[in-house]
Image (tube, helix red, strand yellow):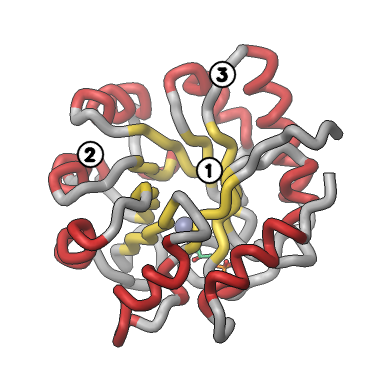
Amino acid sequence: MSSDVKFEIAPSILSADFCCLLDEIKQVEGHAKYLHIDVMDGHYVPNISFGIPVINKIRPHTDMIFDVHLMITNPEEFVEKFAKVGADAITFHIECTDDPKALIDKIHSLGKKAGIAIHPDTPVEKVFPYLKDLEIVLLMSVIPGLGGQKFMEDAPSRLKAIREELDRVGSKALLSVDGGIHTQTIETAVKSGARLLVAGSAVFDTPDHGKAVEDLICAVKL
Ligand code: DX5
Ligand code: ZN
């Protein structure tokens, strides 16, 4: 694999200490361009995280790219609100809409990058018809809803299948992977084609979050 492969880390604030959320973000700001923001509604996933008011409050304090991951039912009802509070990219689950293309178009009409996320139980081929329309394809490598789970064994082959199709159709969409990314798994994920690596516990369950991001980058030997 050539060493000019570029990849980015997206620290996921789901594992941050919410008592001092801004301090947590400031620790990763100089080390990562993207900030991954997990929104859970207690319906699509059996957990509730945070939402629009929190994003609204942190937006003025950082220029990081807000990579908003909606784990919610009826995403079409909410994308406008997330766009308004400053999401840069809005990723919805393909399992949560009947009309992915209409939702992609809606996100684009709001001036935002559009992403589709794929649950581990969903065949990756479901996203193939939309690859040329998307800026992000996010493969879940754990069951959505919780941080700190183990990177699934079939994630590399699923990433490779999407990577091949992205390249075949000439899509420039960023292939993202979310769940279980640590220094032990990140190289496999990058070698399987991922270019935006979401990491929650590997970054925020450590004393020095900036160093944790650098450690992840250094763990990839291409
Ligand atoms: C899980 C979330 C992830 C989560 C990843 O549903 O989408 O973004 O923060 O956490 P780790 O990196 O700890 O697996
Ligand atoms: Zn996520």
Give the structural element (helix, strand or loop) at label 2. helix
Q: Are marks 2 and 1 in contact (CB under 8 Å)?
A: no
Q: Position of residue 109 (x, y in %)?
A: 20, 24
Say which residue label 2 marks. Answer: 76
In the rendered image of this protein, does residue 28 appear above or below residue 19? above
Label 3 close to label 1 by CB (< 8 Å): no
Residue located 70% across and 62% down the image = 151
Q: Earlier in the sequence, mark 3 or mark 1?
A: 1
Q: Is residue 190 above or below residue 203?
A: above
Q: CA distance from mark 3 to mark 2?
A: 24 Å
Q: Residue at x 73, y 24 (%)?
A: 164
Residue 206 percent across, percent down from the top left = 58, 82
Q: Nearer the viewer, mark 3 or mark 2?
A: 3
**Label 3 vs 2, first from the N-terminus:** 2
- Type of the residue with mark 2: Glu
**Spatial distance from mark 2 to mark 1, Cα to Cα?**
18 Å
Q: Position of residue 7 (x, y in %)?
A: 63, 43
Element carrying mark 1: strand
Residue at 30 percent across and 74 percent down: it is 22
Lateral position of residue 102 relative to residue 78, left or right:
right
Identity, as a three-letter code, of the amino acid under mark 1: Leu
The residue that appears at 38% across and 61% down in the rendered structure is 38
> Within 10 angstroms of label 1, few (less than 14), some, or many (20 or more) residues?
many
* Mark 2 or 1, closer to the camera: 1
Q: Is residue 86 visible?
A: yes
Instruction: Please tell me the numbered disc located at residue 171.
Output: 3
Q: Is mark 1 within 8 Å of ligand 2?
A: yes
Tag 3: Cα neighbours inside 10 Å, few (<14), some, or many (≥20)? some
Q: Which of the numbered marks, if any, corresponds to residue 138?
A: 1
